[in-house]
């Protein structure tokens, strides 16, 4: 996901005013037999949604989180090495948590899914959405939207390989492009996946060609939800704020919202959305709360990573969290140059008092 902009400031204003059509009721989400609760969940985010980010999201109100996408072969080859074993660590307080798989060869998905179940993931999600060149060029991720038969073979293989109580879910973009063939293939995969036992499908309202440029098509999400009836659809795309998450639920009628870029540096988005849905004012974290959560995430990182690794991770998150700070630019610049966890903590002492 290297080229993906996760900087909200780089993006066009995403929130459209749709008060004229906002109507749908917001209900608790379930994925298969797993009750999730309030229907704003933490998306799979490559490079971000590691154990510490997921735990922070859970402690701050996310009913469900997803690990960053893993390539099926990577899962099978993972050894118990310090650098990589954290990808397969699932802690008790994370449940329910989803593991996401991406690959090209349908035969490799089943064994990889079994391994994810063995290490404790509660849901297996299949990635048919990733638009990056290496994924699509390697016939993985979003590429599968161009070949429904292969995509559906993958769904069957994962469903057959995992125990019945483990929900299998999909992540799809709305197609490869805007052509009618692409749209037909989307619906073939959608229908076929539910027929083969998929418990829920997350739909990102952008095409693969679109990558991250231009808006996510919420009208398409609305259409898909109307089409599937009681089956579970989670919407994705432009859920940048708590208000946007609530707007997506009300406007499109989807069963859940996947908070992605909007949750990076704002793990309060889940409780904020819940408050807004209840008609309460938006709860904003003060500096003490921001510091508490930053320190919490750093402590969690240090359980998985050495000082160098934890510093790199928390430098990245510090920069994202700085958006919540009144002195955003100075705080971001201060986080950007830290080389040790001690220097990172000194930024907290200087700016979060
Ligand atoms: C940095 C980054 C990493 C992502 N990693 C994944 C991933 O591992 N798996 C996945 O299904 N989607 C991934 N996505 C896509 C998001 O889950 C989401 O569908 C997309 O960002 C649209 O939502 P947004 O516009 O609210 O950010 C990623 C997106 C970003 C920005």
Image (cartoon, rainbow, N blue to C red):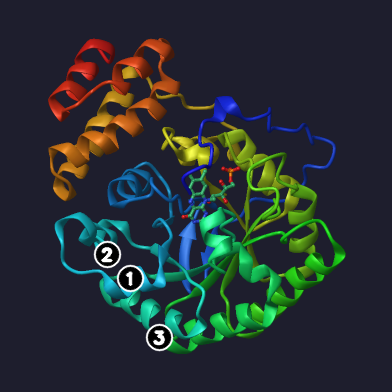
Residue hosting label 3: 163
The quadrant of the picture occupied by the C terminus is: top left
Q: Earlier in the sequence, mark 1 or mark 2?
A: 1
Give the spatial CA distance, label 2 vs label 3.
Answer: 19 Å
Characterize the local packing of mark 2: few (<14), some (14-19) or many (20 or more) Cα atoms within 10 angstroms: many
Which element is circle 3 on? Answer: loop
Disc 1 on helix, strand or loop? Answer: helix
Question: How far from the left and from the top, in percent, is residue 163?
Answer: 40, 86
Reply above or below: 130 against 154.
above
Q: Secondary structure at mark 2?
A: helix
Q: Would residue 217 be visible to someone looking at this image?
A: yes
Q: Nearer the viewer, residue 187 or 93?
A: 187
Instruction: Pick whichever, 310 or 258, lies toward us.
Output: 310
Question: Which residue is rendered at x = 40% and y = 17% of the image?
Answer: 325
Q: Which residue is mark 1?
A: 75
Instruction: Tell me whether circle 1 and circle 2 mark residues in contact (CB < 8 Å).
Output: yes
Residue 32 visible in image: no
290 to 189, vertically: above or below:
above
Q: Nearer the viewer, mark 2 or mark 3?
A: 2
- Would the CB of label 3 be found within 8 Å of ligand 1? no
* Dot 2 and dot 3 residues touching (CB under 8 Å): no
Which-is-in-front pick, marks 1 and 2? 1
- Residue 290: x %, y % from top left: 33, 25
Disc 2 marks which residue? 88
**Label 3, residues with CA under 10 Å away: few <14, some 14-19, many ≥20:** few
Q: x%, y% of residue 319?
A: 37, 26
> Residue at point 33% right, 45% down?
53
Relative horizontal placement of residue 11, taking residue 102 as reference (left or right): right
Q: How far apart are the two marked residues, 3 and 1, measured between alpha carbons?
A: 18 Å
Residue at figure coordinates x 43%, y 60% from the top left: 69
Q: CA distance from mark 1 to mark 2?
A: 8 Å
Task: Tell which circle, 2 or 3, labels the residue nearer the N-terminal end.
Answer: 2
């Amino acid at each position: 996901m290297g080229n993906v902009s996760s900087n909200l400031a780089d993006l066009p204003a995403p929130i459209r005013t749709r008060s004229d059509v906002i109507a749908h009721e917001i209900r608790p989400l379930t994925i298969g037999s797993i009750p999730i609760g309030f229907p704003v969940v933490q998306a799979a985010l490559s490079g971000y949604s590691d154990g510490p980010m997921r735990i922070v999201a859970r402690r701050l109100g996310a009913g469900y989180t997803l690990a960053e996408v893993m390539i099926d072969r990577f899962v099978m080859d993972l050894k118990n090495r310090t650098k990589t074993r954290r990808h397969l660590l699932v802690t008790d307080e994370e449940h329910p948590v989803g593991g996401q798989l991406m690959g090209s060869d349908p035969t490799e998905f089943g064994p990889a899914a079994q391994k994810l179940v063995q290490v404790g993931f509660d849901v297996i999600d299949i990635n048919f959405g990733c638009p990056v060149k290496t994924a699509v060029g390697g016939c993985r991720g979003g590429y599968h939207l161009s070949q429904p038969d292969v995509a559906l073979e993958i769904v069957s293989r994962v469903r057959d390989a995992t125990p019945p109580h483990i929900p299998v879910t999909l992540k799809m973009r709305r197609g490869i492009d805007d052509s009618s063939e692409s749209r037909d293939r989307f619906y073939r995969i959608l229908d076929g996946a539910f027929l083969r036992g998929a418990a829920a499908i997350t739909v990102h309202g952008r095409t693969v060609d679109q990558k991250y440029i231009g808006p996510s098509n919420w009208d398409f999400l609305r259409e898909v939800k109307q089409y599937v009836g009681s089956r579970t659809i989670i919407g994705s795309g432009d859920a940048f704020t708590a208000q946007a998450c609530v707007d997506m639920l009300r406007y499109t009628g989807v069963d859940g919202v996947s908070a992605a870029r909007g949750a990076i540096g704002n793990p309060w988005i889940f409780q904020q959305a819940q408050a807004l849905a209840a008609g309460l004012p938006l709860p904003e974290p003060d500096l003490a709360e921001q510091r508490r959560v930053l320190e919490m995430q750093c402590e969690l990182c240090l359980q998985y990573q050495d000082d160098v690794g934890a510093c790199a991770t928390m430098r990245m998150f510090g920069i994202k969290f700085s958006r919540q700070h009144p002195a955003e630019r100075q705080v971001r610049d201060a986080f950007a140059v830290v080389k040790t966890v001690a220097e990172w903590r000194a930024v907290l002492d200087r700016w979060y008092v």
